Structure formats: structure tokens, C-alpha cells
């Protein structure tokens, strides 16, 4: 079963309330109206839209099962609703990334942010992918953390994990460049440290085209290359982004899904389903 198909199935298991942020512009409003129109006939997912009080959309803009909440600080409002158990999961939507990240760190009292994205190829292969933040995944310890958490997500979805660790070159490239050597050696060490706990984990070298044939979770050499892979796939390669789950909040049993402010309708729609599915699993 495809990962997104499993998430859709789990999102409909029971009733839940999901919050999503709306940025202060008519462009974001038009986009959000299209996204939420897809939920007009989905009765078990109630959605609350949190937006800046200076930017007031009309209730009639949305389906009847959508609630609008005015706030001076939508990021704080979203996370406070989550912490107070007024909603089951949240999606960043189209509010500012920098404001949202600050709020997540402050209110959940965490210093580090790690995200695992759910992506899809142009031909329909879904896979988890990390790191996607430019400051994430640089060390062996980071990669081990990502590998374990992605493994756990797949197991929670009752999907057998297969994890590919990428590096900056082929094994035959060792000795050409110190930076490339470091990525190769780190990938080998990660696989060696985890192979007893994770059966299907392997070093795919720089060959992402081979990794996608076997893996349902791919880990890039670092956050910069990961971010470039994500952008190339989604913005140039006709691939799909379904949202990214924040790992540290999820370990605290709080579901937060990240999205691009300019992501397509499918991304925000899928992110709401992800929030519902993982909150139902908790």
C-alpha cells in the first residue's frame, strides 16, 4: 500500500479537529478556499482556520464545517490550541515559517527542529525523506536520529520500512575529496550502527535513482542537499510534496505538520490528512 493511501485511510478512522494557519493576503485566502472545499463532505475532520485579526475573511468564504479564529498571533494561537488539547493536530499552512518555528520552539520548550517530509515521484512512488531543513542532518548522530524516527513512523503506519542512506559519491570515489569522503564514511557508519536494529537499511551511495527503487525512506547527506533534492523534485520534476511532520513535537505526542506557504493545493490538502492520521494514531 502507498504511504499516502494508508494516511488517507487512517485520517478517516475517527473524529478529530485540525487547525491550519492562514497568511494575511487575498492570494492565500483564495488558495485556502480551494483547499478546504475538498473537505466539505468529510464529516469526521473538523477544521479551524487561524488568521491574523487584521485580515478577516468572511465565514461564507468557507464550507459550513470550517471555523474561523481571529488572532493577533496565529502561530501562538495554533500551538496553544494544540497544547490545551482544543485541537488534535496543526498544519502551518500559509503563515510565516520563521514566526511559526519560533513559536514551536518556545511553547513546546525544544531547542531543535527536525522534520521528515512525505514526497512523491512524478510516477506515483511515495516515500519519506529527510533532512529538508538546511541546518538539519549534518552529523552521524543526526542521521541515526532521523533513521530511527522515520523507521518508527513507517511501523506506526504498518508499512515495512526500507531505508536508504545517501552520500556524496560512490565507494569508488573515496580519496578524491575530503568532504565527499566524509559523507561516504558517515553513511557507512550509520548503516553499521543501525543494521542490527533496522533490517532493511542500506548505503545507496550518491545513487538516489537506485535508492527510490527499494526504499520508502531516503536520508540525504545533509540538510542543504536534502532541501535541493526536495525543491528539484517538487518544483522542477513534477513530483509531489504532502507535508512534513515535526519529529520533536511528535515525540511529545503533539502532531505538527509543516507545509510551504506557496505549496500546491494538494500539499495543504494532504497535510491536513497527515495531521488527522497521526493524531488518530496517538
Image (spheres, helix red, strand yellow):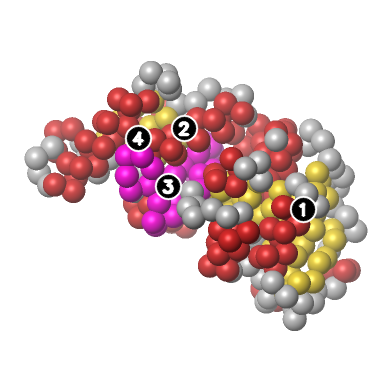
Q: Circle 2 sits in a helix, a strand or a loop, which is it?
A: helix
The residue carrying mark 2 is: 148
Mark 4 nearby-residue class (10 Å; few <14, some 14–19, many ≥20):
many
Q: Position of residue 164 (x, y in %)?
A: 38, 32
Q: CA distance from mark 2 to mark 4?
A: 12 Å
Range of the magenta residues?
A: 115-142
The residue shown at (69%, 58%) is 79
Mark 2 packing: few (<14 Cα in 10 Å), some, or many (20+)?
A: some
Residue position for label 4: 165
Residue 29: percent from the left, percent from the top? Answer: 72, 70
Q: Residue at x 61, y 54 (%)?
A: 108
Give the secondary structure at mark 4.
strand
> Would you say the residues marked 3 and 2 are in contact, meaning their CB atoms lie under 8 Å apart?
no
User: Does 200 appear in magenta?
Assistant: no
Looking at the picture, does residue 282 appear above or below residue 64?
above
Disc nearer the start of the sequence (4/3): 3
Give me the C-alpha separation between circle 4 and circle 3. 11 Å
Mark in front: 2 vs 4? 2
Label 1: state its secondary structure: loop
Q: Nearer the viewer, mark 3 or mark 2?
A: 2
Amino acid at each position: 500500500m502507498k504511504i499516502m493511501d494508508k494516511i488517507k485511510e487512517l485520517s478517516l478512522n475517527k473524529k478529530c479537529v485540525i487547525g491550519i494557519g492562514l497568511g494575511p493576503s487575498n492570494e492565500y485566502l483564495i488558495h485556502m478556499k480551494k483547499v478546504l472545499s475538498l473537505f466539505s463532505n468529510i464529516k469526521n475532520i473538523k477544521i479551524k482556520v487561524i488568521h491574523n485579526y487584521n485580515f478577516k475573511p468572511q465565514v461564507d468564504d468557507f464550507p459550513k464545517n470550517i471555523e474561523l479564529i481571529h488572532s493577533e498571533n496565529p502561530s501562538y494561537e495554533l500551538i496553544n490550541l494544540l497544547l490545551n488539547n482544543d485541537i488534535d493536530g496543526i498544519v502551518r499552512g500559509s503563515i510565516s515559517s520563521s514566526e511559526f518555528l519560533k513559536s514551536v520552539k518556545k511553547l513546546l520548550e525544544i531547542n531543535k527542529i527536525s522534520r521528515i517530509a512525505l514526497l512523491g515521484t512524478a510516477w506515483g512512488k511515495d516515500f519519506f525523506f529527510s533532512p529538508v531543513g538546511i541546518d538539519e542532518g549534518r552529523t552521524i548522530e543526526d542521521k541515526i536520529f532521523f533513521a530511527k524516527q522515520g523507521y518508527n513512523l513507517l511501523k506506526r503506519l504498518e508499512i515495512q520500512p526500507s531505508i536508504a542512506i545517501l552520500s556524496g559519491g560512490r565507494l569508488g570515489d573515496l580519496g578524491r575529496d575530503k568532504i565527499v569522503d566524509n559523507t561516504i564514511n558517515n553513511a557507512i557508519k550509520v548503516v553499521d550502527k543501525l543494521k542490527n536494529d533496522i533490517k532493511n537499511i542500506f548505503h545507496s551511495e550518491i545513487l538516489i535513482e537506485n535508492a527510490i527503487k527499494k526504499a520508502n525512506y531516503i536520508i540525504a547527506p545533509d540538510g542543504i542537499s536534502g532541501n535541493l533534492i526536495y525543491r528539484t523534485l517538487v518544483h522542477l520534476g513534477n513530483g509531489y510534496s504532502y507535508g512534513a511532520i515535526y519529529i520533536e513535537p511528535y515525540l511529545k505526542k503533539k502532531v505538527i505538520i509543516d507545509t510551504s506557504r506557496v505549496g500546491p493545493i494538494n500539499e495543504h490538502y494532504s497535510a491536513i490528512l497527515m495531521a488527522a492520521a497521526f493524531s488518530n494514531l496517538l
